[in-house]
Amino acid sequence: MARRHYLECSPRRRPFEEPTGQRYTGQVPTPEALEQPGVRRRHMTDYIAFIRPEISHIITEYGRAAIKRVCQELYATGVRATPSPWFGLMCERIMWKMCFDPLGDDAPDWPWAHVKYPSVLAQGEEPNGIYARYCQERRVQDEGIARMNERLKAQANAAAAARAADPNNKYLVTSPAPLQHIGEPLRVDTDLDIRRALWNLTISKPFEECNAAGPFEVEPKVPLEWYVFKDLAAINGLLPPCIAVKLNATNKRVFVTIVESAQVNPAVPVREILLDVWEVVQSWAVMVNALGGGEMNTLFQYFLGVKARGGLLWRERAPLPMQQ
């Protein structure tokens, strides 16, 4: 539905009511006079107050909002300087749209299409001051954001380097995503499958009967960063190369597993070592989950206690499995 000429429109007594049928009775400047910004803006303000009396007290706020929107849109397109007449006309058109679009089909169309100004500065012409100040403020803001992004990037890189250098990360794993994208090959957790097979072969009991969360897995209810992760390399330093204690960062579980790449001395069955280490991890988890707070040993401290009491002595029973 085509919009009507602005002088054919009439106000409403209340929003969402039918128009009253009244017509604007104020002075209408000539087309030539309307090319003057001051004349056009006074007439436009009077007309908005007539058609939409409910916003007559905040017309200035609509003007500020229109200026802000024009500045944002110009800046986003890369324009950094603009003539004052053209900038002012764009603000007026946006203000008109903001004021009258809520009226829907009853909204008056922009009536002064004949008013046009060059959008590019002429040689020697001063750019619009409002937009120039906006650009300066945005430059300062953008430079600040860029500096902050650089600092954050540097911090992230430093953190990544620290993580890469941390020997504990060798024993930190994550679980495969449960959902795959269409066309992606299904990821298989080989280690979990091996542990499940070993569990069925050596223990053959439900996990809940063995204080386990999974095959040779426990789920300690303590902050794992402090109680486990920071000592993973030290813990594994107490073990033969064929066995490892690891932390799953996805499900927050600690587990004991076999290191497939290690050569195994048949004099000490790997399963025997696996069960010995599992017993230590399991008993520690039972202890910390039962206490639920207070002073508790970390997993490494617990391993050291077991060692001090004569445990973890596979070296004395047979030569250690050697790693290639």
Image (cartoon, rainbow, N blue to C red):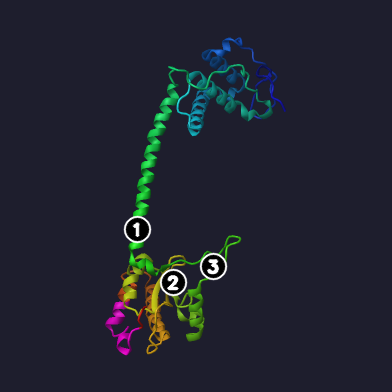
Q: Is residue 297 visible in this depiction of the protein?
A: no
- Name the N-terminal-most of marks 2 and 1: 1
- Magenta span of residues: 303-320
| Residue behind mark 3 | 187
Q: Quadrant of the C terminus?
A: bottom left
The residue carrying pointer 3 sits among few (fewer than 14), some (14 to 19) or many (20 or more) residues within 10 Å by Cα, namely few
Looking at the rendered structure, the secondary structure element under dot 1 is helix
Residue 248, position in %: x, y?
44, 68
Q: Badges 2 and 1: C-beta atoms under 8 Å apart?
A: no
| Left or right: 42 in relation to 246 | right
Q: Which of the labelled discs sits on residue 219, or is there none? A: 2
User: What's the residue at 41%, 70% (across, down)?
Assistant: 247
Q: Quadrant of the N terminus?
A: top right
Which of 106 and 251 lies nearest the eye of the viewer? 251
Looking at the rendered structure, the secondary structure element under dot 3 is loop
Residue 119, compared with residue 308, is above or below; it is above
Which of 221 and 13 lies nearest the eye of the viewer? 221
Callout in the foreground (2, 3): 3
Residue 27, position in %: x, y?
60, 10
Could you tell me how far apart the alpha carbons at marks 2 and 3 are, in whole angstroms? Answer: 24 Å
Residue 200, position in %: x, y?
51, 83
301 in the magenta segment: no
Looking at the rendered structure, the secondary structure element under dot 2 is loop
Query: What is the residue that sits farthest to the right in this orientation?
Result: 1
| Residue behind mark 1 | 161
The residue carrying pointer 1 sits among few (fewer than 14), some (14 to 19) or many (20 or more) residues within 10 Å by Cα, namely few
User: What's the residue at 71%, 25% (across, down)?
Assistant: 2
